[in-house]
Structures are given as C-alpha cells and as structure tokens.
Amino acid sequence: MKLIPDRTSSGLAVLRLEGACACRNGWAFVRRGEYDYAEACRDCGSMRDLAGRFNAASLPAWAHEVAAGWSDDIAPRSAAVDLARRLKESREFGRTYFGDTGRGKSWRACAVATAWLDAGGSLTWVTWPAFVNELRNRIAEKLGGIADGEAKS
Ligand SMILES: [Zn+2]
C-alpha cells in the first residue's frame, strides 16, 4: 500500500491510498490472552493517518509541488521543519507572512503546512480573502446579536 499525490476537481491536493493491505481499513486484530484487540495496522496505519490529516487540511492542488520543489533546498525545508517543531511544542501558535504579491508567502506557508502534517499535526488551509470574509460574517453576526439584544431591553 502506498500514498499517491492527487488533486480533486475542485482544486484541492489530496493523498490517495493505493494497493491492498491485509488489515481491515487500517485496523488489525491482535490476540492477547483470551481477547482480540483492535490496533492501528503497522503496515498502513501511519499512511492512513497522514492521508486523513492531509486531505482534511484542504491544501491547494499545488501543495504537492512544494515538497517536490524543496527536496534539494535544505535551508527552507529545515526552517519549515523547525517551525513545525516549535508549533508542536506550543512555543509558537501561528505565523503570518507579509510581503508583495509573488514573493513566495503561500509557497513557504505551504511548505510549513506539509512539514507540520508530516510531523503528525493537523491544520486547515485558509486563504486571506476567505479569512477576511469569515471575519466579516462573524462580526456581522455579533453586531446583529447585540443590536437584537439592545432592542429587547
Ligand atoms: Zn493495513
């Protein structure tokens, strides 16, 4: 069984599992004494886990190219891995990149995202316009709620 980089028709990067495993959907049963215990499959469990977290992250389709493009570039890759480690150790809670269009902010953020996923983390990829739109909607909801509350009292 192996992971195949793929993309959805809606432009998201996904990892698909290809091949067969003797387990049952990532679970293997191990006999201990009189009982059978379900354990994550040692052959495919970690791949299924990574695929699940990767696919839930909603990374853009070009995310697969980031890892491939940086495979020979030690410095940015180790920086991404270092940030992923700092996030995991809760020494940092996030990172924001500022800069002109086309300077590689998204590319770098995506490298950090994939390193974070490789380190066992989870994330959701959100674009700036979508983030601002979400903020606007939440503020509008709050203001609407306050306005309704004030009208009643
Ligand atoms: Zn398996």
Image (cartoon, grey):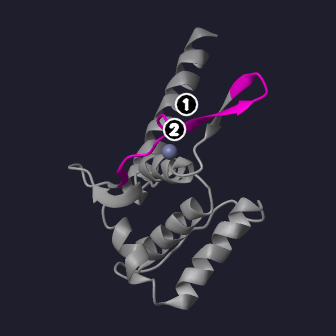
Q: Residue furthest top?
A: 152
Answer yes or no: disc 1 within 8 Å of ligand 1.
no
Identify the amino acid type marked 2: Ile
Mark 1–mark 2 distance (CA, rounded to whole Å): 5 Å
Residue 60 in view (yes/no)? no
The tag on residue 139 is 2
Figure quadrant of the N terminus? bottom left
**Residue 81 location, x and y as percent?**
62, 74
Q: Verify CB contact (< 8 Å) between mark 1 and mark 2.
A: yes
- Please report the residue visible at 69 percent of the width from the left and 59 percent of the height from the top: 93
In the image, residue 13 above or below residue 63? above
- Please report the residue visible at 50 percent of the width from the left and 75 percent of the height from the top: 98
User: Magenta residues, as a range?
Assistant: 15-36
| Image quadrant where residue 82 sits | bottom right
Q: Secondary structure at mark 2?
A: helix
How crowded pointer 1 is (Cα within 10 Å; few <14, some 14-19, many 20+) is rated as: few
- Please report the residue visible at 62 percent of the width from the left and 63 percent of the height from the top: 119
Q: Is residue 130 magenta?
A: no
Figure quadrant of the C terminus? top right
Determine which residue is flagged by label 1: 142
Q: Secondary structure at mark 1?
A: helix
**Residue 25 location, x and y as percent?**
47, 36
Q: Is residue 28 magenta?
A: yes
In the image shown, does 78 or 37 lie closer to the viewer?
37
- Please report the residue visible at 39 percent of the width from the left and 50 percent of the height from the top: 130
